[in-house]
Image (cartoon, rainbow, N blue to C red):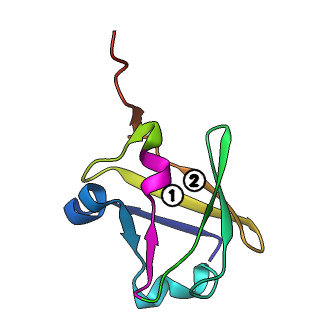
């Protein structure tokens, strides 16, 4: 499996995490092992925690992830991934 893709559930979008189900767990590194996730022009360092969740709060600094938004994570090499989130938009700028 070189790609992980699915829509976000409401609690994931609201509480800023992705839960990885057991069948997809081998796609990501072991719990606690840092990995790089490139999203647009920025690279983030993330980890899978002991509950098989990836805490994604860093991604929310600029972009708004909502329930139903599709995430597609592509594995480029060991511990290096690229995120495509076509439904996700930057937060509206305060003018």
Q: Residue furthest top?
A: 95
Above or below, 56 against 93 in this view is below
Query: Measured along the vertical axis of the image, is residue 68 above or below residue 62?
Result: below
> Magenta stretch?
51-60
* Residue under label 1: 72
Counting from the top left corner in percent of width and height, residue 73 is at 56, 61
Which sits earlier in the primary sequence, circle 2 or circle 1? 1
Q: Position of residue 25 (x, y in %)?
A: 51, 86
Residue drawn at point x = 60 percent, y = 78 percent: 28
SS at badge 1: strand
Callout 2: SS: strand
The mark lying in front, picked from 2 and 1, is 2
Query: Is residue 57 inside the magenta stretch?
Result: yes
Picture residue at 65% right of the left edge, 71% below the top: 2
76 or 33, which is in the foreground? 33
| Dot 1 alpha-carbon crowd within 10 angstroms: few under 14, some 14 to 19, many 20 or more | some
Q: Which percent across, then down, holds residue 7? A: 34, 59
Left or right, residue 84 beside residue 21: right
Quarter holding residue 64: top left
Give yes or no for contact between labels 2 and 1 (Cβ–Cβ under 8 Å).
yes
Between the C-alphas of marks 2 and 1, the distance is 6 Å
Quadrant of image for the C terminus: top left
For image coordinates 45% across by 60% down, the residue present is 56
Residue 21 located within the stretch drawn in magenta: no
Q: Farthest left residue?
A: 10
Which label number is shown at residue 83?
2
- Mark seen at residue 41: none
Number of other residues with Cα within 10 Å of mark 2, as a class: few under 14, some 14 to 19, many 20 or more: some
């Amino acid at each position: 499996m070189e790609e992980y893709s699915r829509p976000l559930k409401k609690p994931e979008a609201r509480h800023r995490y992705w839960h990885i189900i057991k069948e997809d767990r081998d796609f990501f590194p072991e719990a606690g092992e840092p990995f790089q996730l490139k999203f647009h022009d920025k690279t983030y360092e993330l980890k899978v925690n002991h509950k098989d969740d990836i805490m994604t709060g860093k991604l929310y600094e600029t972009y708004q992830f909502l329930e139903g938004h599709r995430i597609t994570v592509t594995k480029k090499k060991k511990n290096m991934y690229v995120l495509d989130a076509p439904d996700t938009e930057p937060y509206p700028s305060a003018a």
